[in-house]
Structure formats: structure tokens, C-alpha cells
């Protein structure tokens, strides 16, 4: 008999077909994204869950007495209550690696778009406001040979550093919990403390995972350390930044601009002050959003789910739970 799994999101056809071969599948049929409360009602006798971002906590786990695995279709997994999963001996997986280059591409796109004011000037041209003789009012900032400070040097950080140092001949510095000597030598990176990175970088890119230690890592004190002509880029998680402080930094010109793919509340409110600022580029959390990458992520989550339910070792157990499975 095939194990029963509950799939709480729409999947690409390839991933759905793969799961149907190995599992009895039930799908979320409601409008919009499933909530944790609704998932608790739906989980029933399922042995496995496949979710993206839905909070998985004790209430959900208690509602599924047969659960053995939760496959999170995301590299991040701050939606998972790891302690509750560990206590119930339920393995949890995520989808690292497959999205690294795609997110790195997006980080560079935000950096370039912010520096050269691409969205703002696109709007100007389309509004018929480009006039003959315009010059200084169209100026942006150079990217090549400037200093990029990366906070969080994981796989995505290394992918960005490679693009920046080799492609744009940028001087790349980084701050990380652990120093990465091999990456320093291979990519020509400079390791420094957070305060030094903030005060010396022309572009600051935040790439840390969301943890209790990194929540609101960027606050007023950190933005005040940055150069007035520096640009802040966030493609990590919205809660790593205190948005009130970022708004103040931009309004009071502590920094020159920002490029954002993530926000404290998503979707971001239409009346949020960040959306009224020409010197802020705002994207709708699309870091991994290409068709190819999303298919690879879905297949990775599906394989993790099937492996866990068929006695094989899942490839991508979240790091904190690896010692227990």
C-alpha cells in the first residue's frame, strides 16, 4: 500500500507525477494559500506533508498522528517548529542548493537596478518625462570596482561574490559566523567584522537565514554605520530587518537607496512607505522564481518526501535535525 501524503500547494506536473507513482496523494483544494489552522483540519491520516511556508507547529503535528516527514519546498525553514518535530521524531527536509544561482542572479539584478535607478528611469521614459538636455538628474552609481559587503556567506553568498568579483571586479568583503578561508582564497574575499563591513561598503547585501539571532539584525544603529551613498539590498528574509529603521534611514538620507525582495509582512501593504520611494526597488519575493528552478525545487522536495517514507535517507534534512535521523 502506498503511503498517504498531503500536498498543501500546487506542484509542477513533473513533481506531481513523481509523487503519484510512489504515494497516495491528497491536495489542498481551497482558494489561496493554506493556513496552519486549515492544515490541521486537513492532515488527517497523512504520513507525509509537502508545504511551502505554512507554519508547522505542535497543533498541526498533533492533528496528524501518522506523520513521519514534513518536506518544506523552500531553502529557508523558519516556518518549522524544530523542537516540536524533534520531540515527535518527525523528519523535516528543505530544498537547498538548487536555487543558489537563481537567487544570486536576482541579488545582482537588484544591486544593478538600484545603483542605476532602472525602475525609476523606466517609469520616467514611459511617462513621457524624458526631456532633451537631461543629464545630472539621470545619474546613478557605478557598480564596477566598488566594495560589496555580504552579510552571510553561505552558498548563495559565494555565488554572488563570484559574480561580483569576477564579473564586475568588485572588492568583496563578508561577515559570517564562521570564517571561510577557502572561499577567501578562491574568490579573493576579505573577512571583517559587521561594523567595519557596514561602514566601508558601497553596497550591503543581507543573505542570512532568519534565526532568533538574526531577527532585526539590521536596525537603526546598523543603518547609521553605512555610508550616505551606500545602497542596502535584502534577499534573505524580511524579518532580518527592522523596517521602521530602514524607512527612517531612507527618509533621513542616512543611505542612498535600497533593493528589496522580502518584507516583514508579505504581501507588503500597498500603503507601506517603502513603496512611495523612488530610490527603493521593490520586488514581490521572487528570489527563486524561474520556471526551471521552481521545477527543480519541487522535484527535490518530492524526492525527500518519498525517500523518507520508503526507508531511504532523505538528502536534505534541515541541519538542526540531522543528528537525530
Image (cartoon, rainbow, N blue to C red):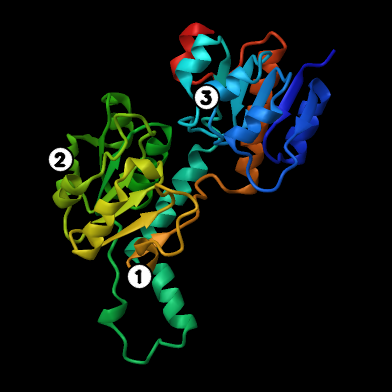
Tag 1, which secondary structure?
loop
Q: Is residue 22 visible?
A: yes
Give the residue displayed 58% in from the left and 33% down from the top. 36
Residue 305 spot, x, y in % from top left: 67, 21
Q: Of marks 2 and 3, which one's residue comes earlier in the chain?
A: 3
Q: On the picture, is 218 further left or further right than 163?
A: left
Which residue, given by chain and number where applicable, does mark 3 sit on? 57
Residue 37 spot, x, y in % from top left: 60, 33
Give the residue displayed 16% in from the left and 46% down from the top. 221
- Vertical side of 126 occupied by 165: above or below: above
Label 2 Cα neighbours within 10 Å, binned few <14 / some 14-19 / many ≥20: few
Q: On the picture, is 72 further left or further right than 259?
A: right
Quick one: 143 or 151, which is closer to the camera?
A: 151
Q: Nearer the viewer, mark 3 or mark 1?
A: 3
Tag 2, which secondary structure?
helix
Which residue, given by chain and number where applicable, does mark 2 sit on? 195
Q: On the picture, is 118 further left or further right than 177?
A: right
Which residue, given by chain and number where applicable, does mark 1 sit on? 278
- Vertical side of 6 occupied by 236: above or below: below
Q: Of marks 1 and 2, which one's residue comes earlier in the chain?
A: 2
Residue 118 spot, x, y in % from top left: 41, 68
Q: Nearer the viewer, mark 2 or mark 3?
A: 3
Q: Residue placed farthest to the right in the image? A: 1
Quarter of the picture holding the N terminus: top right
Quick one: 187 or 39, which is closer to the camera?
A: 39
Residue 225 spot, x, y in % from top left: 14, 49
Amino acid at each position: 500500500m502506498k503511503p498517504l501524503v498531503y500536498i498543501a500547494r500546487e506542484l509542477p506536473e513533473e513533481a506531481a507525477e513523481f509523487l503519484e507513482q510512489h504515494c497516495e496523494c491528497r491536495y489542498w483544494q481551497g482558494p489561496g494559500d493554506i493556513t496552519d489552522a486549515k492544515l490541521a483540519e486537513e492532515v488527517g491520516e497523512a504520513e507525509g506533508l509537502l508545504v511551502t511556508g505554512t507554519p508547522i507547529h505542535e497543533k498541526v503535528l498533533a492533528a496528524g498522528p501518522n506523520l513521519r516527514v514534513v518536506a518544506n519546498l523552500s531553502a529557508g525553514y523558519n516556518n518549522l517548529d524544530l523542537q516540536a518535530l524533534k520531540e515527535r521524531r518527525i523528519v523535516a527536509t528543505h530544498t537547498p542548493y538548487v536555487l543558489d544561482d537563481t537567487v544570486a542572479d536576482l541579488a545582482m539584478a537588484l544591486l544593478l537596478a538600484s545603483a542605476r535607478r532602472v525602475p525609476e528611469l523606466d517609469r520616467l521614459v514611459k511617462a513621457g518625462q524624458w526631456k532633451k538636455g537631461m543629464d545630472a538628474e539621470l545619474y546613478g552609481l557605478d557598480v564596477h570596482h566598488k566594495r560589496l559587503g555580504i552579510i552571510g556567506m553561505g552558498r548563495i553568498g559565494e555565488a554572488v561574490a563570484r559574480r561580483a568579483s569576477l564579473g564586475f571586479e568588485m572588492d568583496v568583503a563578508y561577515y559570517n559566523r564562521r570564517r571561510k578561508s577557502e572561499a577567501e582564497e578562491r574568490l579573493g574575499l576579505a573577512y571583517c567584522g559587521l561594523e567595519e563591513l557596514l561602514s566601508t561598503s558601497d553596497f550591503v547585501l543581507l543573505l542570512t537565514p532568519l534565526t532568533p539571532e538574526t531577527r532585526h539584525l539590521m536596525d537603526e544603529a546598523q543603518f547609521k554605520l553605512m555610508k550616505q551613498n551606500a545602497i542596502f539590498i535584502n534577499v534573505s528574509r524580511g524579518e532580518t530587518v527592522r523596517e521602521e529603521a530602514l524607512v527612517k534611514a531612507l527618509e533621513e538620507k542616512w543611505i542612498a537607496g535600497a533593493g528589496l525582495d522580502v518584507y516583514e509582512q508579505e504581501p507588503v501593504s500597498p500603503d507601506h512607505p517603502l513603496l512611495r520611494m523612488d530610490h527603493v526597488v521593490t520586488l514581490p519575493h521572487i528570489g527563486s522564481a524561474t520556471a526551471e528552478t521552481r521545477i527543480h525545487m519541487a522535484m527535490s522536495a518530492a524526492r525527500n518526501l518519498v525517500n523518507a517514507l520508503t526507508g531511504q535517507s532523505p538528502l536534505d534534512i534541515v541541519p538542526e535535525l540531522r543528528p537525530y535521523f
